Amino acid sequence: MPYAIVEDVPASWEQYEAVGAAIADPIPDGLILHVAGPTDEGFRTIEVWETREAWLRFHDRATAPEVCAPPVLRELRAVHVVRGSR
């Protein structure tokens, strides 16, 4: 079942841009969707992965920007999923 995660990071959009390209080249195994944008407090990412395990594999290898406070993670274990056509 797909796994979604929302991450609010207290870092600048410029800090995201410095490391954000890593998610796109190459696209990590198991990643379905990644969106990111600036917020008043820093930046937010929303990701959907094929499984929680796929996210954990990526997360364990990923390089995050240095921030003053830890990011806030919100997990969603999907129970109902509707996929559009590819």
Image: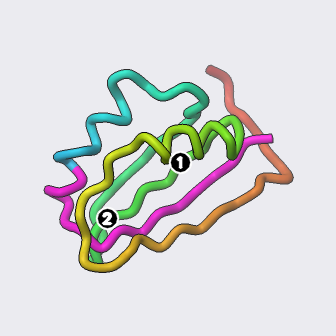
Please name the residue shown 53% across and 61% down the image. 6
Residue 43 image label: 2
In the rendered view, would you say 55 is above or below 31?
below
| Observer-nearest of 22 and 43 | 22
Q: Which amino acid is tagged 2?
A: Phe
Of all residues shown, which one is farthest toward the right?
Answer: 79
Which amino acid type is shown beneath numbered disc 1? Glu
Left or right placement of residue 43 versus residue 15 in this view: right
Distance of label 1 from label 2 (alpha carbons): 13 Å
Of residues 40 and 50, the one drawn nearer to the viewer in this rendering = 50
User: Image quadrant of residue 65?
Assistant: bottom left
- Residues in magenta? 1-16
Residue at 42%, 69% in the rendered image: 8
Q: Is residue 67 above or below residue 15?
A: below
Q: Quadrant of the N terminus?
A: top right
The quadrant holding residue 26 is top left
Q: Is residue 8 magenta?
A: yes
**Position in image of residue 30 (x %, y %):** 60, 30
Position in image of residue 73 (x %, y %):
53, 68
Percent across and percent down for residue 43 are 31, 64
Q: Is residue 42 left or right of residue 77?
A: left
The residue beneath circle 1 is 47
Q: Secondary structure at mark 1?
A: strand
x and y percentages locating residue 22 in the rendered image: 31, 34
Q: Which mark is residue 29?
A: none
**Residue at (78, 52) in percent of width and height:** 78
**Is residue 64 depicted above or below 67 in this figure?**
above
Apparent side of residue 45 relative to residue 12 in the rendered image (left or right): right
Q: Quadrant of the C terminus?
A: top right
